[in-house]
Image: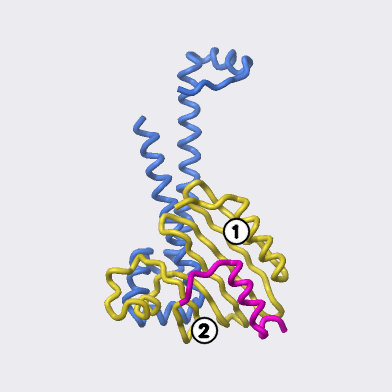
Amino acid sequence: MLTIAIDNEWVEMAQLFGDVERIVTEVLQAYLIDQCQQRIDKAAAKITTYDQKYHCDYETFKQSIQTDEDFLKRVEAQNPLWEEDAMEWEYWLEEHQTWHNQLKTILKR
Amino acid sequence: MAQPTQNHFETLTDLAQNALDKVSLSRLDFNPDRAIWEVHGSLGEFEIRLKEIFSQAGRMYSYYVIKSGEVVVGFDNYPDRRALQQKYGQDISAHLSELVPHKHGPRKVSLELTEEMTVEAFLEYLREQVIFSC
């Protein structure tokens, strides 16, 4: 268990609302939930941008680009730098999954 | 895999600023597990786009030269169909997640497999190409 120094002024104010340790734990949990949610929302917005740009989800996109020559030609004609998008699309999906898992872990505690 | 530090990306940005004109850091996001670095610049009439992503898949990169909206040359390692087929033949099903370094020629009409490229090597490649120094 980590010990953290908090200014007496804050501790005294927190005591007005109950047990300081419980309050700090609750506030920290709320902060972490908020931070996770912000990251989830940011990743979700990026993913939606790519879903809309390519009219499909990433799994469909990747499978089509690797198996469907016509799909690849169409994508390349419309956006010659599609690899930049594909890489980033994958990145944001990974980011989304990671923070979603973190949030689940926090909420279970 | 070990993720790069902010210092790593500052070094890449410095390299780009020394080699290119009108350099702008388009994006830099990183956390302990993942990172994105993206820089745009120019060389004369050519637009240069550099992007690196570090994730669970490894280091993905995309270094492109663009002129009038069309690809002049580009290096990336995204596992696209043509690169996988050149490396493994028609049956690529076992390699769909594998990063495959390759180079695209003008207008992406041609593709050839390459060694893994870095920002430093790409900028050196640009220096060696007379067309980009005009």
Q: Report the chain shown in yellow.
A: B
Please name the residue shown 57% across and 59% down the image.
Answer: B37
What is the crowding at mark 2: few (fewer than 14 residues within 10 Å), some, or many (at least 20)? some
The residue beneath circle 2 is: B105
Q: Which residue is pictured at 35% across the width and 65% down the height?
A: B97
Mark 2 residue element: loop
Nearer to me, A102 or B121: B121
The residue range painted magenta reads: B114-134
* A14, B71: nearer the viewer: B71
How far across and how far down the image is residue B96, in percent?
33, 68
Query: Which residue occupies 56% across, 71% down?
Result: B63
SS at mark 1 in the image: strand
The blue-tinted chain is: A
Type of amino acid at the residue the image marks with label 1: Arg
Is residue B18 found inside the magenta-colored segment of the image?
no
In front: mark 1 or mark 2? 2
Chain of residue at mark 1: B
Residue B129, above or below A83: below
User: Which residue, given by chain and number where applicable, does mark 1 sit on?
Assistant: B27
Three-letter residue code for mark 2: Gly
